[in-house]
Image (cartoon, helix red, strand yellow):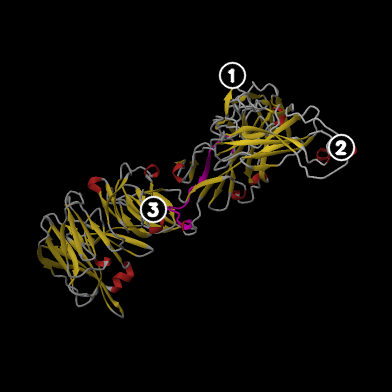
């Protein structure tokens, strides 16, 4: 309610007369009564407290009125501590102060005297009255203390303290905001100032700025405005608990499934799934308008990484939440292929059944494409020559399985890589020793069913029963490594140029070291244990590789040098030298430079530190029966001589012929004594396995590289490019009586 402070003055504070002396005739003189000193004057100022103090919080308009009864108002002036205050339309404005203080407001009122005198008519005679008030400036922040609450039913409620300002009652509140959902500005009045709260029934989530304007009665002070931004927790994709995952649909396709979001007052509007599928033309967009749907089936997903961009809208198109999903799949590799021998000519290749319904196309080494029958994961192919390393050079897989989506249109005449979503393959049809190194050589130890693999960066040991391989020694890269382990000892000798290490019991620890003055070329290297615990080592006596070759004898336990065995060379150069398995015989291949006819092979018998020449094979004999001479590694009483057409086996020391076979000798299986030799085929050479009695051909197949070694009917490719491929031929061997 508006209040007026009324002050009345009944006593004239000052009555001013302005006069001068003059003479006049009596006819012109009129006697007047003396003006009264009591004037009834009232000054009314709105919204002044009962204590008569005017409170100023902010810029304030003070409206006043003067009741001078019958008197004419000549002038009114306002001063605040002596400073004049302008007035306008019966109002003055007082401005707020940056500090609290109290000042005097004085109001000076001038009224006409109405005496009728000349001074009165000339406005030189007047009544003057003065009013005085206290003005108290209050320093305060003119704002509402707004807090946010939630009602029991989840509505946003803004609550504030009602302003408590002396002489300044609140008239009403107005709340307005822009509703981004409807796109409209909304406004609400609270006419009861006792209701200092507002419940927004429209608000659900997100940014909203409220403008709260407080109006005061009679506009004593200007309305002030408070801004408030709704406080809310920024929802993330994790907050809505989609739990996006996958399963295999009933038809075998990839099915994405999720939980329907359950956020208070934020219903699902729609879903959107986006992903890239090159086989279907690029970006795929799947709109799901059914709010209750919680799954999506991709009938063209087969294999590999695919990123699904999943978006859900809640409450309106303005509130979207996006996540990504990459399918979980089993990555297949060469290790997943299984090769099953149907027979010697046919291999069945299988791999794990794809996780999802898809099209499978097998790409073979010969550029042939095979469409795999739905529901199967095998094909039968013709066995390739052992170990088939030709494709190793081009870095192509010999077999690739390509997985295509069921909706993909493909051409079987084109490379399946144009259509597939992923593939896996292998470079070999044959097994390989499990080493990531380049094999340089193989050393068998038949007593322990072991095969040692000498490689560039280490030595590996393979159990030839389980075919498990382990690394037993590591070293810097080399190509000069050699090794010996034989039937006469449990020791191992490892040679690296001129350094020899002797290990006990195949332990590869705490070696006995021997260091020679010079190294020796591998073609006439001898590194063999004897039955009386000695170690025979071939070595140069100088830096040359072509003369002064000696056979040195060391104690195998201590590494102590014992003596040399002289090697008679007939004044010729040594081209090659070998010892029989029992160290009883030595083979020396001799020659003179620039004289091919000087070539000869001497067979010597060793006895202690002496040698005895038992036969010389002349140039003519070598040309007639073959220049390639070998000891039988399984039977030391047999000598093998041949060329690339045939070979003969002779008995030592009589040199009587035991057998003659058409073909080129390759090697002897150190375990069972079978002979391996090659013969010509249509496209490739054939490797043949002959029993030790030379009575029965046990096995034959094509090969495409160096002649393989054999360890108890396991073929091992010595080619560095075959990466240690091997093939167990036991099941294909013809049985002997």
Looking at the image, which is closer to me, 585 or 39?
39
Rendering quarter of residue 153: top right
In three-dimensional space, the C-alpha distance between marks 3 and 1, rounded to whole angstroms, equals 92 Å
Q: Distance between the residues labelled 3 and 2?
A: 170 Å
Q: Which of 598 and 164 is in front in this view?
A: 164
Image quadrant for the C terminus?
A: top left
- Residue located at (76% from left, 37% from top): 126
Looking at the image, which residue is at 20% across and 63% down?
A: 499
Query: Mark 1: which secondary structure?
Result: loop
In the image, which is nearer the foreground, mark 3 or mark 2? 2
- Up the image or down, 626 lies above or below 700; here it is below
Answer with left or right where residue 365 lies relative to residue 318.
Answer: left
> Magenta stretch: residue 389 in it?
yes
Magenta residues: mostly which secondary structure? loop
Mark 3 secondary-structure assignment: strand
Front residue of this view, candidates 483 and 62: 62
The label shown at residue 688 is: 3
Of discs 1 and 2, which sits in the foreground? 2
- Residue hosting label 2: 29
Magenta region: which residues? 373-391
Dot 3 or dot 1, earlier in sequence: 1
Q: What residue does disc 1 label?
A: 152
């Amino acid at each position: 309610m508006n209040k007026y402070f009324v002050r009345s003055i009944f006593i004239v504070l000052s009555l001013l007369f302005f006069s001068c002396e003059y003479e006049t005739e009596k006819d012109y003189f009129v006697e007047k009564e003396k003006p009264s000193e009591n004037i009834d004057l009232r000054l009314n100022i709105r919204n002044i407290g009962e204590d008569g103090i005017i409170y100023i919080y902010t810029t304030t308009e003070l409206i006043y009125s003067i009741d001078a009864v019958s008197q004419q108002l000549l002038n009114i002036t306002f001063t605040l501590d002596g400073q004049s205050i302008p007035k306008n339309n019966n109002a003055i404005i007082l401005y707020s102060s940056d500090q609290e203080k109290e000042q005097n407001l004085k109001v000076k009122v001038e009224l006409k005297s109405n005496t009728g005198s000349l001074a009165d008519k000339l406005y030189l005679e007047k009544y003057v009255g003065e009013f005085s008030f206290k003005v108290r400036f209050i320093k305060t922040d003119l704002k509402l203390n707004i807090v946010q609450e939630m009602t029991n039913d989840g509505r946003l409620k803004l609550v504030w303290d009602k302003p408590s300002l002396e002489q300044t009652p609140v008239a009403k509140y107005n709340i307005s905001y822009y509703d981004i959902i409807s796109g409209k500005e909304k406004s609400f009045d609270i006419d009861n100032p006792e209701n200092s709260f507002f419940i927004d029934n429209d608000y659900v989530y997100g940014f909203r700025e409220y403008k709260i304007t407080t109006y005061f009665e009679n506009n004593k002070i200007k309305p002030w405005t408070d801004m408030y931004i709704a406080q809310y927790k920024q929802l993330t994709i994790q907050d809505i608990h989609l739990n996006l995952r996958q399963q295999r649909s009933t038809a075998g396709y990839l099915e994405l499934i999720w939980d329907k979001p359950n956020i208070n007052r934020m219903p699902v509007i729609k879903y959107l799934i986006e992903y890239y599928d090159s086989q279907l033309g690029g970006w795929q967009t799947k709109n799901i308008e059914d709010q209750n749907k919680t799954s999506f089936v991709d009938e063209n997903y087969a294999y590999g990484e695919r990123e699904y961009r999943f978006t859900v809208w809640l409450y309106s198109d303005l509130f979207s939440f996006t996540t990504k999903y990459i399918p979980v799949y089993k990555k297949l590799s060469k290790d997943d292929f299984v090769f099953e021998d149907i027979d010697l000519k046919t291999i069945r290749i299988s791999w794990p059944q794809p996780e999802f319904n898809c099209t499978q196309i097998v790409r073979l080494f010969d550029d042939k494409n095979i469409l795999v029958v739905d529901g199967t994961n095998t094909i039968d192919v013709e066995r390739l020559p052992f170990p088939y390393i030709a494709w190793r050079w081009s870095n192509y897989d010999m077999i690739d399985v390509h997985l295509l989506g069921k909706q993909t249109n493909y051409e079987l005449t084109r490379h399946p890589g144009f259509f597939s979503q992923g593939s896996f393959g292998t470079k070999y049809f044959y097994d390989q020793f499990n080493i990531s190194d380049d094999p340089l050589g193989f050393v068998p130890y038949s007593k322990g069913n072991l095969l040692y693999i000498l490689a560039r960066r280490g030595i590996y040991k393979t159990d030839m029963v389980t075919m498990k391989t382990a690394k037993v020694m590591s070293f810097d890269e080399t190509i000069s490594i050699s090794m010996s382990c034989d039937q006469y000892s449990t020791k191992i000798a490892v040679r690296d140029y001129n350094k020899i290490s002797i290990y006990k019991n195949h332990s590869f620890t705490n070696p006995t070291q021997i260091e020679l003055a010079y190294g020796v070329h591998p073609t006439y290297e001898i590194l063999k244990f004897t039955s009386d615990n000695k170690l025979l080592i071939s070595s140069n006596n100088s830096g040359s590789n072509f003369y002064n070759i000696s056979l040195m004898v060391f104690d195998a336990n201590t590494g102590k040098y014992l003596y040399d065995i002289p090697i008679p060379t007939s004044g010729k150069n040594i081209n090659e030298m070998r010892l029989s398995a029992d160290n009883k015989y030595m083979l020396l291949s001799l020659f003179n430079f620039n004289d091919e006819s000087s070539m000869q092979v001497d067979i010597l018998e060793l006895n202690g530190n002496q040698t005895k020449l038992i036969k010389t094979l002349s140039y003519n004999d070598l040309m007639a029966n073959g220049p390639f001479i070998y000891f039988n590694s399984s039977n030391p009483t047999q000598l093998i001589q041949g060329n690339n057409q045939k070979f003969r086996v002779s008995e030592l020391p009589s040199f009587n012929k035991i057998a003659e076979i058409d073909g080129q000798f390759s090697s002897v299986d150190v375990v069972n004594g079978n002979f391996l030799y090659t013969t010509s085929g249509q496209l490739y050479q054939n490797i043949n396995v002959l029993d030790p009695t030379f009575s029965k051909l046990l096995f034959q197949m094509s090969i495409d590289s160096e002649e393989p070694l054999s360890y108890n009917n396991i073929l091992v490719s010595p080619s560095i490019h075959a990466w240690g491929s091997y093939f167990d031929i036991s099941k294909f061997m013809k049985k002997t009586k």
